[in-house]
Image (cartoon, rainbow, N blue to C red):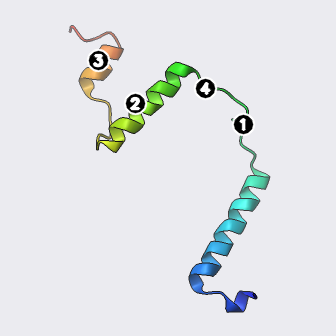
Amino acid sequence: MQVKDLTIDELKTLIRETVMEALEALLPDPDEGATVREDFKQELLEIRKRRALGSRSIPAEEVMERLGLGDR
């Protein structure tokens, strides 16, 4: 198949994949091989769960509690 035979969507996909391959080759992942602390991982999972339920931020009360400012 030649480029002239591709649909616009197929051409866009081909270009997107080519650009991604080039970027991955030029910009290696700086975190490759790194580990994530379990507490940080759990916090990220909680954020994901809240976002899935429609919440986009941490409630102010929770921030205050985390900072030890809950009784003010």
Residues marked 2 and 4 touching at CB (< 8 Å): no
CA–CA distance between discs 4 and 3? 25 Å
Counting from the top left corner in percent of width and height, residue 7 is at: 60, 87
Q: Earlier in the sequence, mark 2 or mark 4?
A: 4
Write down the residue under mark 4: 36
> Along the polypeptide, which appears first: circle 1 or circle 3?
1
Image-based side of 47 in relation to 16, left or right? left
The alpha-carbon separation of the residues under discs 1 and 4 comes to: 11 Å
Quadrant of res 9? bottom right
SS assignment at label 3: helix
Q: CA distance from mark 1 to mark 3?
A: 34 Å
The earlier-in-sequence mark between 1 and 2 is 1
Where residue 40 appears, x then y in whole percent?
51, 24
Q: Secondary structure at mark 1?
A: loop
Q: What's the CA distance linking mark 1 and mark 2?
A: 23 Å
Q: Residues within 10 Å of mark 1 (few under 14, many from 20)?
A: few
Q: Label 4 amino acid? A: Val
* Residue indicated by mark 2: 46
Residue 37 coordinates in the image, percent (x, y):
58, 21
Q: Residue at x 28, y 44 (%)?
A: 54
From the viewer's side, name the closer residue of 63 and 12.
12
Q: Residue at x 35, y 14 (%)?
A: 67
Q: Is residue 20 left or right of residue 38?
A: right
Q: Are marks 4 and 3 in contact (CB under 8 Å)?
A: no
User: In this rendering, which labeled residue sits more in front, label 3 or label 2?
Assistant: 2
Number of the label disc, if any, that sits on residue 44? none
